[in-house]
Image (cartoon, rainbow, N blue to C red):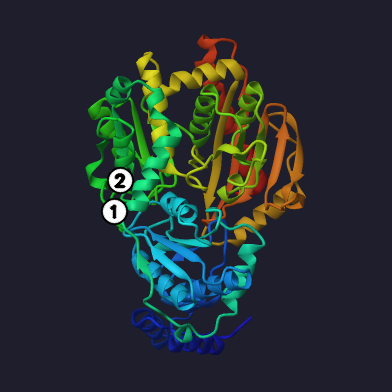
Amino acid sequence: MTGPDDLLTRARAWAADDPHAGDRAEVEALVAAGDEAELARRFTGPLTFGTAGLRGPLRAGPAGMNAAVVTRAAAGLGSWLDAHGHAGGGVVIGYDARHRSDEFAHTSAAVLSAAGFAVQVLPRPLPTPVLSYAVRHLGAVAGVMVTASHNPPQDNGYKVYLADGAQLVPPADRQIEAAIAAVGPARAVPLSDDWLTLGDDVEADYVAAVVDALQPGRVRLADRQHLRVAYTAMHGVGSSTTRRVFEAAGFAPLHAVAQQDRPDPAFPTVAFPNPEEPGAVDLLVDLAVQVDAHVAIAEDPDADRCSVVCDDRQLTGNEVGVLLADWLLRRGVRGTYARSLVSGSLLGELARAHGVPAEETPTGFKWIIRAGSAQAPLVFGYEEALGYAVTPSVAHDKDGVSAALAVALLAAELAAEGRTLTDRLDELAVEHGLYATGQLSVRVEDLTRISDAMARLRSAPPAQLLGRDVEVTDLAESDPPVDAVRLRGEGVRVIVRPSGTEPKLKAYLETVVPVPDRAGVAAARSRGADELDRLRAEMSAALGL
């Protein structure tokens, strides 16, 4: 444990090495004020590579996103690429519209260019899936996306992609983290302006690739043009690219939430710019009612995820996931269908019914996107947190833009028959049973509450849930190890894990209710909702929350 003198010494040393005048002044002001509590928050340790690379609040010091941290991250990435035989290769850099995203992208370009890499930067704030696509499209050895995705406005982040266009997995993440730690003084890191800004052709190629992969021509043009779609970019970067995709696919212009259609790093109309959060899609729902939309779609700020509203109800990520999988399967798309272990089980039932392989992966799209085999490559993957890969041959990551188009194509097919997305969900419930899913999610200030709850669950798990015996599996003992505990019994399943991107503890709940016929769907949904409420109460007690 360090004392206040050591803390002040480290803070002064950091400020002396900080290459950014504003960040340097921020630390110096805290030192001058003797604000030890705030300095402790910023100097307890560096940001670490989590589920999606670096992510944290915009603030000076090692525990924040700032110019010094980004400089060292880029230098460490360059060092790792050199050590793994990629010296002089191409690196593509993208960025969203958050505070300082363009600055961090250009800083990374300067560092990696000075390290000998052929650096190309996307021309403006663009969706994360465009960056993932660009890595493979341009034959780069790595990509960097400056984004905090759906985190609060005060955050930013730094995702690293390798040559396959996918996010990092172990051991590369730990190795890059070690390379970052080995970087010398930030001010001593060489910089160069010998990098290129790309034109609009990469985005145009991405748009064409998405449209080609989803074959909108299989849906009648009149049905596509008839569909009314309400849409929001949620103050993010998806609006322009999504419009281009829908126009190229032959849809009528989107009805957009005007207040949220342009990028705004303050996210003024939402408490959290995350479609999963309560109230986040209220303006979208209002617009959908006004224009009598067949379907409403919200993308998160970097457009790698999307949420769907139909018949005045926001669908869950599991519901959208099975709708898209069912649509692809009925189209005859064969290959591997994958989901994360915390996502709903129905995908596996659908895959088995169609005779195609299904995989359950660790949490995170970096694992989902690597599912499949040479004989049965990945053709669809999803996670319940609104992430979908419907065109994994285009973007090797979750992609809210292509998912939005796929949802619209499915909705157009159904609307032509007088049906909706929720009608198809009811049909699936009759065919396979009603898979009701939900969450218990607790946001904390003190991270020890999460570790304490996990320890409590591991040492004294419940023997029953919903009155049914459950088997308990500690997934920390799986390969690869996952910090999660699974409880599973007849028609009930719960998985508990800490969030990889936010200070949250999450319990993923599922119960399966038999459905005798179409007339029994409403009763089954009511029973499913009641059982989820009971599961929340039982798990809250088990976790001591």
The residue under label 1 is which amino acid type? Pro
Q: Is residue 203 left or right of residue 50?
A: left
Q: Mark 1 vs mark 2: give the one in front.
A: 2
Above or below, 29 relative to 81: below
Are there few (<14), some (14-19), or many (20+) residues within 10 Å of tag 1? Answer: many
- Circle 2 residue: 239
- The residue under the point 63% across, 63% down is 172
Query: Measured from the top left, where is residue 476 in percent x and y?
Result: 73, 52
10 and 38: which one is in front?
Answer: 10
Would residue 374 be seen by someone viewing this image from the given angle? yes
**Residue depicted at x 39% and y 67%:** 105
Q: Quadrant of residue 45?
A: bottom right
Q: Which residue is mark 1?
A: 263
Q: Are marks 1 and 2 in contact (CB under 8 Å)?
A: yes
Q: Quadrant of residue 120?
A: bottom left
Q: Quadrant of the N terminus?
A: bottom right
Q: Secondary structure at mark 1?
A: loop
- Name the amino acid type tagged 2: Ser
Image vertical order of residue 454 relative to residue 74, above or below: above
Query: In the image, 296: left or right of 315?
Result: left
Residue 232: give its label.
none
Q: Quadrant of residue 97?
A: bottom left
Secondary structure at badge 2 equals helix
Instruction: From the viewer's side, name the closer residue of 287 and 97.
Output: 97
Q: Earlier in the sequence, mark 1 or mark 2?
A: 2
Q: Residue 337 in the image: x percent, y percent?
A: 60, 34
